[in-house]
């Protein structure tokens, strides 16, 4: 989809993914259990991640701080790292999963929207 607003052309696409790594993050499960569908989340490149140089953390942001509680999957992060670094990706909770009878771990599916400026080719 291409949006044209105020002489600014943008390419916008939305897709869904899941949160990963919350069981390895201190407090990650507690935060997931408290999330609400539609809640806005923030993405941040986890520059010092020893396992993945493209790791993108999913953060719950408050007025005082930002708490990473999970990651986007490694394959997705590798494709989106430039967009995340350029602040071109928005994220919100699409669906809460797990944390039900028989499933002890909470989870969430997220909606990611990427908005990229379209570079005009000069003749």
Image: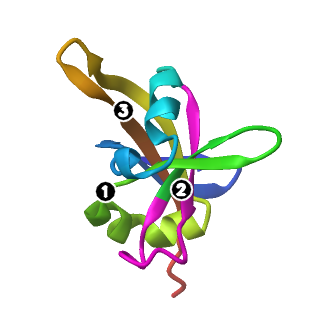
Q: Quadrant of residue 51?
A: bottom left
* The magenta segment: 39-56
Q: Nearer the viewer, residue 93 or 68?
A: 68
The numbered mark, 1 or 3, whose residue comes first in the sequence reads 1
Do the residues bearing badges 1 and 3 touch, measured as CB atoms within 8 Å?
Answer: no
Q: Secondary structure at mark 2?
A: strand
30 vs 36: above or below: below
Disc 2 crowd, CA 10 A, few/some/many (<14, 14-19, 20+): some
Q: Which one is in front in this view, the residue at disc 1 or the one at disc 2?
A: 1
Magenta segment includes 122: no
Q: Please identify the residue farthest to the bottom as the structure is shown.
A: 123
Q: Which residue is mark 2?
A: 10
The numbered mark, 1 or 2, whose residue comes first in the sequence reads 2
Q: Position of residue 72 (x, y in %)?
A: 38, 54
In the image, what residue occupies the spot 35% across and 51% down? 21
Q: Which residue is mark 1?
A: 73
Q: Quadrant of residue 105?
A: top left
Q: Which residue is mark 3?
A: 108
Taken as a whole, is the magenta stretch helix, strand or loop? Answer: loop
């Amino acid at each position: 989809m291409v949006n044209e607003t105020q002489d600014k052309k943008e390419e916008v696409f939305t897709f869904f993914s899941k949160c990963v790594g919350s069981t390895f993050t201190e407090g990650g499960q507690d935060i997931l259990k408290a999330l609400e569908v539609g809640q806005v989340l923030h993405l941040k490149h986890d520059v010092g991640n020893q396992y993945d140089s493209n790791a993108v953390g999913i953060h719950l942001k408050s007025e005082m701080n930002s708490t990473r509680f999970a990651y986007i999957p490694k394959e997705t992060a590798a494709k989106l790292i430039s967009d995340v670094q350029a602040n071109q990706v928005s994220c919100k909770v699409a669906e809460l999963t797990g944390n039900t009878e028989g499933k002890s771990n909470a989870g969430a599916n997220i909606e990611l929207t990427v908005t990229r400026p379209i570079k005009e080719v000069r003749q």
